[in-house]
Amino acid sequence: MVYLGLHNMINRELEKIYNKIVDVYPFLSEKERIDFEKKAKNLIKKTLFSKKGVGFLLNLLKNPHAYLWVWKKPSLAKIRKKRKVLSKIENRTLSLTIPSWSGELGVLDKKLIDICVKNIERYDGILIDVRNNQGGNSRIAHSFASIFFKTPCVYGKFIKRKEGGKLFSVTAVLQPNSEIYLDKPIVILTSNKCFSSNELFLAPFKVSGRAILIGEKTRGGSGNPMQEEVNLGHKKIIVLIPTWRFFLARNNDPIEKTKINPDIIYKKKNILNFAVKYLQEKSSHSKSS
């Protein structure tokens, strides 16, 4: 760990966060790293350790996964209520509203798969609404998505850092479910709230064209952040630092810049009716062909 030579013990905490960022954040170029270090050092010299000061430091990364929050004991009852999956079948359309991919929901992927498989004779198409989904566990998201793919789908790549600072690339591949394949037409609703693991859920559908995305451009960010705890008076602050950068297939910039664009931009309030009508027409066409 390399300190900046400051003598103020309060600011040593801010320096620790700075050093952790330099250790783990995957800067994509030497210029990007040097630019951050230069701005960060100037900031630390002028700013005392505080929630606002840490926020300023994280903002220099220009990555929405770099942020902080004041720790509070979570209410599991409120979490479950807020993240409850809704499903209904109407006019031969299965509608699923998925507000989170959080692991706190347990076997969410199995629940969603069961809904799709057990009711397969009752619907012709699937409408998936993830407009308010800000992420969670990408393993759960991809476990559910896997039942809609027959072959592996390369949907992008992750850039990470090895110990010692070297960058390396990992190909992002969605593996199909070995036992279940549903070939029903799919429409997915998106918004600018879609973020993180939810964007990793959307990526294979977008790249392969397996589903039609309707709505707005996503927020842009998938960084697998690590957590650092710091104490600020009597409050515990959780600092999140991204540990990878995700690139959607065929893009030269990370998702923070590119976002995920819908296939059909639609911002009107009647988006549900529009999507259902679109899906029903697509289902009818699939049947006739």
Image (spheres, helix red, strand yellow):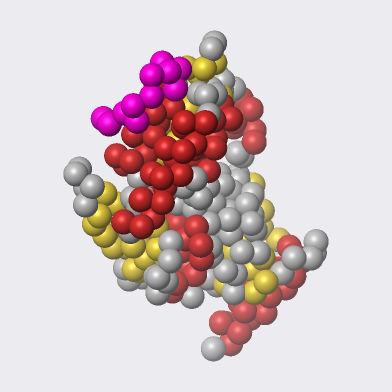
Asked if 40 appears above or below 250 in the picture, the reply is above
What secondary structure is the magenta-colored segment mainly?
loop
Which quadrant of the figure contains the N terminus?
top left
In the orientation shown, which residue stands out farthest toward the right?
269
Quadrant for residue 278, please give it.
bottom right
In the orientation shown, which residue stands out farthest toward the bottom?
289
Residue situated in front as seen by the camera: 281 or 6: 6
Residue situated in front as seen by the camera: 114 or 224: 224
- Count of all numbered marks drawn on residues in the image: 0
- In percent of width and height, residue 285 lies at 61, 84
User: Is residue 103 in view?
Assistant: no
Asked if residue 216 is among those painted magenta in the image, a careful observer would answer no
- In percent of width and height, residue 76 lies at 57, 25
- In percent of width and height, residue 53 lies at 54, 30
User: Is residue 253 in view?
Assistant: yes
Q: Residue at x 79, y 65 (%)?
A: 268
Quadrant for residue 52, please give it.
top right
Residue situated in front as seen by the camera: 224 or 94: 224
Which quadrant of the figure contains the C terminus?
bottom right
In the rendered structure, the answer to whether residue 134 lies left or right of residue 173 reads: right
In the orientation shown, which residue stands out farthest toward the top?
234
Q: What residue span does the magenta drawing correspond to?
A: 1-11
Q: Residue at x 67, y 65 (%)?
A: 215
Quadrant for residue 264, please give it.
bottom right
- In percent of width and height, residue 201 lies at 47, 57
Asked if 130 appears above or below 215 in the picture, the reply is above
Q: Residue at x 34, y 62 (%)?
A: 157
Asked if residue 8 is among those painted magenta in the image, a careful observer would answer yes
Q: Residue at x 60, y 69 (%)?
A: 262
